[in-house]
Image (tube, helix red, strand yellow):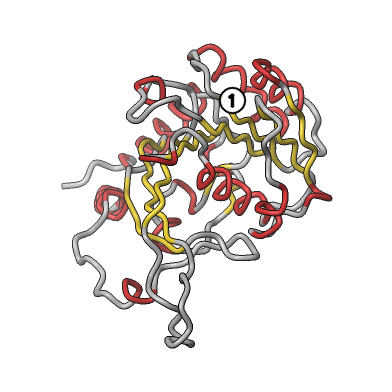
Amino acid sequence: MAIPGKAALLNELREQVARIEGHGDARARPTLAFGLPVLDDGLPHGGLARGALHEVAGAGANVEHASAAALLVAGILARAGGPVLWASEHFDLFAPALAGVGLPGSRVVHVEAGRSVLLAMEEGLRHRGLAGVVGEYSGRLSLTASRRLQLAAEASGAMAFLIRRGPKLNDLLLSEPTAAVTRWKVACLPSPPPLPHSPETPGLGRARWQLDLMRCRGGMPGSWILEACDAQGHLALPADLAHRPAATAPSRFHRRAAADRAAAA
């Protein structure tokens, strides 16, 4: 027999936890959807949280330069609208690549900040006119420093992305706990054979990534093989994977929703 008011009590407890973690009313948090149900359905509130810090790192041979990670972030912010502050340790940002995924140079303010990337990000997050703030950083990220960035992002409402550039494979620095709401890893995969609409033309098809959600506050980790961002910043399921039958096992979110409905009955 269901206990009257149990569902309401559970919802109240969840809101209390969200407030303790610094989220305020979790239901009102704005998000930016990927536009892919396989990604959005596993994220709290159906997308990446705005006003929050997100970590992105390369994987495998891409861990040092994090070019795929940078393109993923640029594609996301291309769909966010508004200007973007991009801080990096070195003057190695390739603007044409960002424009290729929908983020033109006219929207990007690039700052060569050296070892002061975190400070530049925090200063940028104090300006409410920015859609996003990006930092490329290869040093150690303390819990305190990440918490400052998270609080600054919450106050401004802008999306904050910290692209972690590790000096070696399987860098343990990239696994230390931080205050980021999500943590992603992006690995480059071999592109498909010649383009499907022109099989006689040699060349590479659209780039492919393995996108791993390593940590998600209020969500579940996951791993996906996707086609890289297009000229509008959109990811896509590869054609040879998009038509596979979906798994029938209910997700944790569906199980919890079903339990709440049963408790309210």
Quarter containing the C terminus? bottom left
**Front one among 13 and 158:** 158
| Residue 230 location (% of width, % of height) | 58, 65
Helix or strand or loop: what does disc 1 sit on? Answer: helix
Task: Judge whether 246 appears above or below 68 on screen.
Answer: below
Residue 115 quadrant: top right
Name the residue rendered at 72%, 48% in the picture: 95
| Residue 19 location (% of width, % of height) | 52, 26
Task: Judge whether 105 appears above or below 166 on screen.
Answer: below
Task: Judge whether 61 appears above or below 112 on screen.
Answer: below
Q: Residues within 10 Å of mark 1 (few under 14, many from 20)?
A: many
Q: Residue furthest front?
A: 202
**Front one among 232 and 259:** 232
| Residue 9 location (% of width, % of height) | 36, 35
Q: Residue furthest left?
A: 1
What residue does disc 1 label? 150
Name the residue rendered at 26%, 54% in the picture: 251
Horizontal arrangement in the rendering, residue 81 relative to residue 33 (left or right): right
Horizontal arrangement in the rendering, residue 189 relative to residue 94 (left or right): left
Horizontal arrangement in the rendering, residue 130 relative to residue 100 (left or right): right
| Residue 235 location (% of width, % of height) | 51, 62
